[in-house]
Amino acid sequence: MLPLEHLHLEHVLQTVSVLEAVVRRSFGPEGGQVLFTQDTGQAMLTRSGTRILTALHLEHPLARMVVECVWKHSTVTGDGSKTFIILLASILRMIHATARKEPKASHSYNSTKTAEAATARYLADKLLAFGLKDLHDLIAREVVPYGCCVTWEDFTAKQSSSLTDNNNVQKLVASFFQTRLSLTHSDFISDLTCELLNKWKSKNGPPSYSLRFLNDNFPALHTRVSGFPISSSRLIEGQVIHRDFATPLSQADRQPIKAVVFNEYLQPKLLNTGEVLELGRGGRVMEERSIVHFSAWTERSLECVIANLKTLGVSVLLSAVKQSAAVLALATQAQLCVVECVSEDELALFAKLSGAAPVTDCHVIQPEHVAKLTFCRPILLGAHRYVHVAFQASEEMIMVEPCSLVICAPVEGQTEQYTRAFHDAICMLHTTWEPICATLTASQKTLESCNFLHMDSQAASTIGPGCVIPASGTFEFLLNRALQKHCHSYTVSSDTSNNFSVSQILATALLSIPQEIYSHNLRCFLQTQTRILNCISNDFHPSTLFYQPGHNSNPIQNGGPPEGGKLSLHCCRKGDVSSKVFVLDLGLESVSCKYQLLLAVLQCVTSLLQADTILRTHTALHTRSHRLANSSPEDTEDEFRD
Amino acid sequence: MSRLVKKSPSVCTDLPLDNADIWNKLVLLRQLLTSCFGPTARLKQVHNNIGGHVVTTSASSVLLPAISSSQPFINLIKTSILNHVSRFSDCGLFAGIFCLALIEQAKQSGLRANVSIRVNRHLLALCTSYLQREDCGCKVNLDFCSSQNLITLARSIISSKPACVLTEPEILHISKLAVQAFLLTVPCTSPGTVSLGRVVTVPVEGHPVLNSAVFPGLLVDIPDGLCLSSADHLCSSLNMVLFSASLAGDLSELGDGIIEVHQGVDTESQILDQLLELGKQVVKDEVKLFMCQKVIHPVLQQYLRSHGIIVVERLGITLMEPLTELTGAQPVAALHSVIPAKAYGKVKDLSIRQFGSKTMLHLHPVGESAICTMILCHRNETMLSELKVVCQKTEHVLRLTLREPSALLGGGCTESHLAAHVRHQTKNEVSEMVSALQCSHTEYLHGVEAFCFSLESVARALEHDGGNSLIDLTHAHHWTLPAGIMKEHMEDSLCSCGCGLVQSSPCRKWTYLNTKYAEFPPAPLLRENTVHPRVLDSFTAKLNALQVAVETANLALEVRYIIQDVN
């Protein structure tokens, strides 16, 4: 008899609440870090919800299912994993309360528990249906007009002229880092991110191209250095190859420096595995057929390659493998610098940036294999000496300024955290801009036309690309109001009560997020809510929202606003464009990320409530249970889904 | 398959700073580091549970790796300090004590963590900008025309490590050697980018410290019984060759295939013949010194020796780079081709030096060279290993002065001065900062007090013999009042401050460092050339230590949850 465990709504709620309790500690701008040790004993720091949840090594199947949902969501958007859990818990709580109050009137269920479960399941389905059908329009109609659109041109604008809205990208990234890193460093790191994006943006390509390039090549583009304060992090020109020179650096200062990439051994291996060399067969020992002869041949062949490289004017060799001592000695004599054991990622990036192909056969080296560098020198980063190269501008790369990121922090765990946060920020920006490229073919034109938000109320039917909204609960407050308006209209038109309750559930659940953000000071919560709702209701057209200087009172007397910025609203205008949008000094967040988050949570609720029983099987270890026992977040199989 | 073990759930700790166990460990670590601080520090003996050798130390770079805690929170702080030490070699204990004091004070002041973090960060910015100012009252500019300040800097580092067990003249001797070695590694004439040479340290046990010496050039271990024929000394320079490949008769680069050797074929002798060919060429080219990174075949060795060539094998990879720099030789790895003429290097002279049981071959450079060898002698192994660590640190710190030619006053004066400066500065800007940092007036003042108190606690940590720490009310320097002296006789027993720049005078006023005093602007010292500071700290290292300490403390205050993987 298998141990059966019936799942009730309470169980689900309980499990999610436990996860919520963990995640809450690092949620929002007032949240803190989570220190965790890996099974290797290495200590890591994080504020990323996904990492926290996976570090717990949860056993409960339901909890693991939730973690998997979070993991899937955050790999796509790079953001929102903590909000995911809090929203999930809140929605489940609402469903629980509703289901308890009004179990379905039908008497076909034999217990209240089952009736409750059925109602909950029904509500979850309805929620998902609502989310898939109406949510997009609702957000586009009721929330997007209050946000603004960050365009790719904002990146290109100089930081110095960031008087009005040019620093929107910076704000968007800053509020992301505020919840992912520490409050104190978010400004510094976001400036650095913007600088990085500025250097890497190609002026003629779509934004997502640059972002995807950064996203893909990030591992090769950064260097972690521990033992320095975070403020020592910086950008450096060109690329850092994370190896040292294997031969002494020659002092020759020829311009340009020519480099060649090798994937193979320069000195030919005489015998490959499995091959047999017979010496002195049949007694006919010939002097020139001795082992020395073969060994001399490989050396001569190597000399030819080196001589060929010299005629091409090459002075730097990058090699994916460890070369023999003879190669190093001959290269030193020929004044070639050798860099061995360069990782594949770095060589791929090098090839992309320099436009030179790696050499496949070292006897055929053509000019197209030769990369031109402006310099190639050692660079000391922390304890290690690396090779620092910069590229001569070629036609394809003329639009970008290649640069690498040096991430400094006192502890290794922290550099790791900053690196991940950087990567996720790029991922988040990618999600923010991605939709347009997927849906609109003439993306270039749209980008320019949607320079700033021209959201007339009739045109406002989509979530624009790069659409952002003030952070710290604005989205939730606005959507809450929109949902209440929505369900009000339903009650007026006397529609079914289900739609009413569904949007009501979602509306109330959404408020839990700002509540959590302002949990240290609930007065702040009410103040912010009132202010935002006042702003909306006082002005009939969303684009005429203004900030009145005397509107907000002294934040200190109010017990302090929640985070880095003052709670002031100010308008940002651009040139002669008449549309004005209010931007809270609280930072910004991406609307499309929020929308995707809501959908992901609703899907997770549905799938959670669909399970009703856990079967714990005790089978002998075979491949399937092997996977079960090892189930890591990378496992994308849904083994617990019924 | 059967060894597959299910992963166990992680162990969680909520709000680690409220946890009594972690709190006690933090206090213990602070006490431990405090007792190791300064020239009168209490030494620590480290020995492991399986009978390894005992290490006596007070240096953070040796002590901290020996402390292993099961608590990741402690390890976080530990690794942070260690990372700083590995980059800057100095001020590790300063960073540790300051960081732990900050955490303790922030917790005791009862401030919200985020408020403490913001205030700390603001005050750190205040400190770093003050230290980088030209008119900073606790900074001394280093003058490379005179070695006085360099020796003081070296001396401060060496004397702050009592585990070396050095007498006053020995400290001075080693300090001078350290500065001499450092100056030898700086090339005199080299336009463009300067690349520093290196100091090769050779420890010799059982000899008096005063026998330690620095030699330009390289000293290489050689087997006993070698004597130099006097004829060699006549020529102005000697040819030498350096091999990086093994000359033992193996062919390592053939690949992974199988070699079938039929009867009658003697591969070994074929290879040996090839090696002897090399030997013949070397003899023909009048090489006097034959060196190899790896092993040389005994037959080849014998052949070379019989032709009056000095053979040195098994040099190891670490000596290769200094050797090529010193001699200008290019390492040779090709066995089948003629050694090109430019691969040969030159040494000016060779001599044999004897240090205790060690016989060493001294290679003198032909021209000027930035390579030098430091022979360190000490009475026993424990002291010698500590001395070696200290000398390497000193060399590193001296190198740092090339980038930033300044030093900070030692003896606790920088800390007390900085604290007084912070107190004074913050008094003037309370109202602006309160709104910028989003905290209340009292919160801000509490935060400042916690920061200054922590800074002063580092100065107080220098005293281990029950004495009192004082601060004077004009320059805000740190003074030490020996135990058992009443306040009335204070003026007689105090003659100069910790760094030695301020002298006692009847009009001077003091107060205890751990008491509250009315803030005042610390007056900069009048620069007289006659008085030199007695104790100096590395500027670069201390600045970084300050930043790392505050950042680590902030990080520790930010940690709200610990998840320990117990698999």
Image (tube, helix red, strand yellow):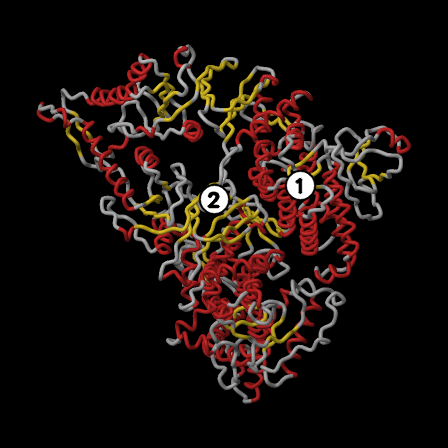
Q: Position of residue A153 (x, y in %)?
A: 49, 70
In the picture as drawn, the residue positioned furthest to the right comes out as B488
Q: Residue at x 71, y 49 (%)?
A: B106
The quarter in which the C terminus of chain A is drawn is bottom left
The quarter in which the N terminus of chain A is drawn is bottom left
Query: Under tag 2, what secondary structure?
Result: strand
Q: Position of residue A104 (x, y in %)?
A: 52, 77
Q: How many marks?
A: 2
Chain of the residue on which disc 1 is drawn: B
> Horizontal placement of B467 versus A478: left or right?
right
Q: Nearer the viewer, residue B5 or B116?
A: B116
Q: Is residue A530 above or below residue A41?
A: below
Query: Under tag 1, what secondary structure?
Result: helix
Q: Which mark is residue A279?
A: none
Q: Is residue B429 above or below residue B67?
A: below
Q: Position of residue A353 (x, y in %)?
A: 37, 56
> Horizontal placement of B246 versus B102: left or right?
left
Q: Which of the 4 image quadrants contains residue B435? A: bottom right
Can the viewer see residue B51 in this picture? no
The amino acid type, in three-letter code, at marker 1 is Leu
Q: Nearer the viewer, residue B404 or B230?
A: B230
Q: Nearer the viewer, residue B363 or A217?
A: B363
Q: CA distance from mark 2 to mark 1?
A: 37 Å
Q: Position of residue A521 (x, y in %)?
A: 70, 64
> Horizontal placement of A625 versus A612: left or right?
left
Q: Is residue B425 above or below residue B537?
A: below
Q: Which mark is residue B26?
A: 1
According to the image, label 2 marks what residue?
A379
What crowding class fits label 1: few (fewer than 14 Cα within 10 Å), some (14-19), or many (20 or more)? many
Q: Is residue B88 above or below residue B175?
A: below
